[in-house]
Image (cartoon, rainbow, N blue to C red):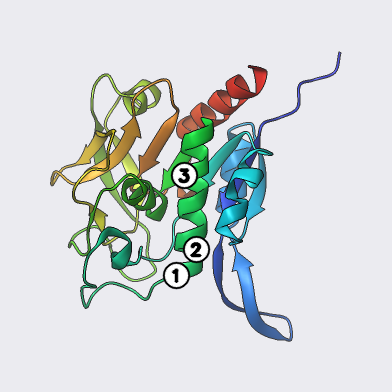
Amino acid sequence: MTQPAKPLIGVTTYLDRARWGVWDMPAVLLPAQYPRYVRDGGGLAVMLPPDEPSEAAAVLARLDGLVVAGGADVEPARYGAVPDPRTGPPARERDAWELALIGAALASGTPLLGVCRGMQLLNVALGGTLTQHLDGHVEAPGVMGRHPVKPVPGTLYASLVPEQAEVPAYHHQAVDRLGAGLAPSAHAEDGTVEAVELAEPAWVLGVQWHPEMGEDPRLVRGLVEAAAAVRRR
């Protein structure tokens, strides 16, 4: 009997300058942990480098699910704010492309997981704002820290991870005002919103930490299962 095809999960990428071999040039990058994470969840990963925002809906039509990866700070102009001196340089091509992908995913009902920056962009896409700097959520430059997050009972996140969990994290920004329709589904000990989601029937979840850097596949399994269910409709 032929096995059903695994859900195809698009993962957004960095756009940066990189060096390899004799080359030093602009490149699209994705930490290897992301495709591994998608595979651990039972999906097939495909990279989505920045492209024309007008093509987002056509790209989403070929995918079963979407992961918006971490990376640079969202440009404050996207949510009507003046840049804080501690906010990093903008990644405007990524912002435009990934906001278009999020919009297309929401319009089409494509299951979506936002990781760190991806959660922040989801919030901004729905009219929310960000806190541009907070202390205590970065252990040291280039070092992934860990801290506990507590789920909100009755949420999608709590259905996947019902217990308080230690998560890998590296961020200095966070959700301020929630976007339209979003509800918090996990918090850090200091009250920072660590996960947000939309109400059913959509499968839309954003987490402030980096699950791809850990060993717990429950979130991505939930995404892949939702993607498989959408494909069967």
Determine the secondary structure under disc 3. Answer: helix
Ranked by sequence position, the earlier of labels 3 and 1 is 1
119 versus 199 height, above or below? below
In the rendered structure, find residue 91 and report the number of the disc placed on it.
1
Q: Residue at x 25, y 54 (%)?
A: 174
Q: Residues within 10 Å of mark 3 (few under 14, many from 20)?
A: some
Q: Residue 195: which quarter of the image?
A: top left
Q: Residue at x 61, y 61 (%)?
A: 51
Going by the numbered disc 3, the residue's amino acid type is Gly
Q: Are marks 2 and 1 in contact (CB under 8 Å)?
A: yes
What residue sits right under mark 3 in the picture?
103
Q: For the residues carrying marks 2 and 3, which lies nearer the camera in this image?
A: 3
What residue sits right under mark 2 in the picture?
94
**Residue 191 screen position, x and y as percent:** 14, 43
Nearer the observer, 159 or 59: 59
Per the model, the C-alpha gap separating discs 2 and 3 is 14 Å
Nearer the observer, 18 or 122: 122
Q: Residues within 10 Å of mark 1 (few under 14, many from 20)?
A: some
